[in-house]
Image: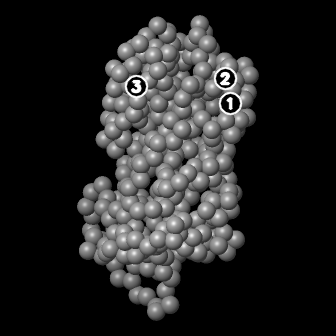
Amino acid sequence: MSSTADLDTTVFAASKNFYQAVGKIDGNVVSSPVSCIYALGMLYAGSNNQTRKIMAKALQLPEDLTETAAKFEAVSLALTQGLNGVEFSIANKAFAAEDINIPLDYITLISKSFLASAENADFKRPEEATAKINDWVNAKTKGLIEKLLDEPLDIKTRLVLLNAMYFKGQWKSQFKPENTKMTQYYWGNYDIYMEVPMMNKIDNYRHAHLPDLDAQAIAIPYEGDDINLLVILPNKEDGLYSLIDKINQVDDLKSIMSKMTTDVIDVFLPKFKIESTIDLEPYLREMGLADIFEMPDLSGISATENLKVSKAIQKAVIEVNEEGTVASSSTGIVVIEKSMNVFRCDHPFFFFLTYRDKFSLFGGKFDKP
């Protein structure tokens, strides 16, 4: 089984409308379809009958649970043990109300295939239960996400399924802090100029001109070469929102990467940190998953409860700067021509954290500093 090939179809199915939809949210945004898929995967593992058929179709998963479980197990191992030079972790958790007896076979399944655990929580004490969940998320993201839930859970809450992903990588060739300068940035949506801390480096990068998208793209590698920061920059300063409608995540991410050639590029990239909280319900409904919010069959999680999803929230954080996880030293000499390519991110752009040129772990847009 090729784990990454197996996951491609599922990630792309979830991503097809996901990035286009969240890309229309005002301001900066970051999201992770992979994180969403893991949470949905644990829900799928506890589904039966028509709900399983609906979820299988929407997520392009096999209806056979054994096959799906094997797929997630292989992917989990590939992402957590097969990456070189970066720190990446996935954590999954099921919190059930104290009077729900989660079947042992479900606990065993999510433990093996999703690297997940399950425990009970007293949702009749919503403040305490909320704090317990937030503490778990905070620990698994190493403090990057302090709180997933800003408000106490509803006292009627019966089940919470969580996924937390953490990534920290060191650039393969680091930006030097002394080259970071305050530089003019154009916020095209409101025809405003402002200053941002702009990193700068001249090096060999994979790069492509994309006339069909009226844009260009660059892949900036992290140590180990498994993960890249893919930046898609509109040619026009105010071209971000027209680009949203042109990008088809299913076809274009792979095709963009395949069009790239290595060249000497003078890169200008803002330092940025983005934190987003997204209500996933409208996007999941658009994907064909309205059933999980209405009358789902989740009897694999509880045979005695009529469970349904009341809330689906994702919080994601990404920080891009000159630094990495550890200090490193490298020496290189680059001979350039006067006509070298310049990739200047001085106006809004899209970004994706890509896994082996296959799919994106995180993605979003940088709009306003």
Instruction: Give x and y (percent) for residue 300.
Output: 60, 16
Question: Quick one: label 3 or label 1, which is nearer the N terminus?
Answer: 3
Q: How far is the residue under mark 1 from the one under mark 2?
A: 7 Å
Residue at 65% from the left image edge and 73% from the top image edge: 214
Callout 2: SS: helix
In the picture of the structure, the residue carrying the numbered disc 1 is 290
Callout 3: SS: loop
Residue 200 visible somewhere in the drawing: no
Residue at 68% from the left image edge and 19% from the top image edge: 295
Residue at 65% from the left image edge and 30% from the top image edge: 67
Instruction: Give x and y (percent) for residue 311.
Output: 54, 29
On screen, residue 308 versus residue 145, left or right, reads right
In the picture of the structure, the residue carrying the numbered disc 2 is 294
The foreground one among 128 and 169 is 128
Give the position of the N terminus as an image quadrant. Answer: top right
Q: Mark 1 and mark 2 in contact? Answer it, CB < 8 Å.
A: yes
Residue at 32% from the left image edge and 74% from the top image edge: 182
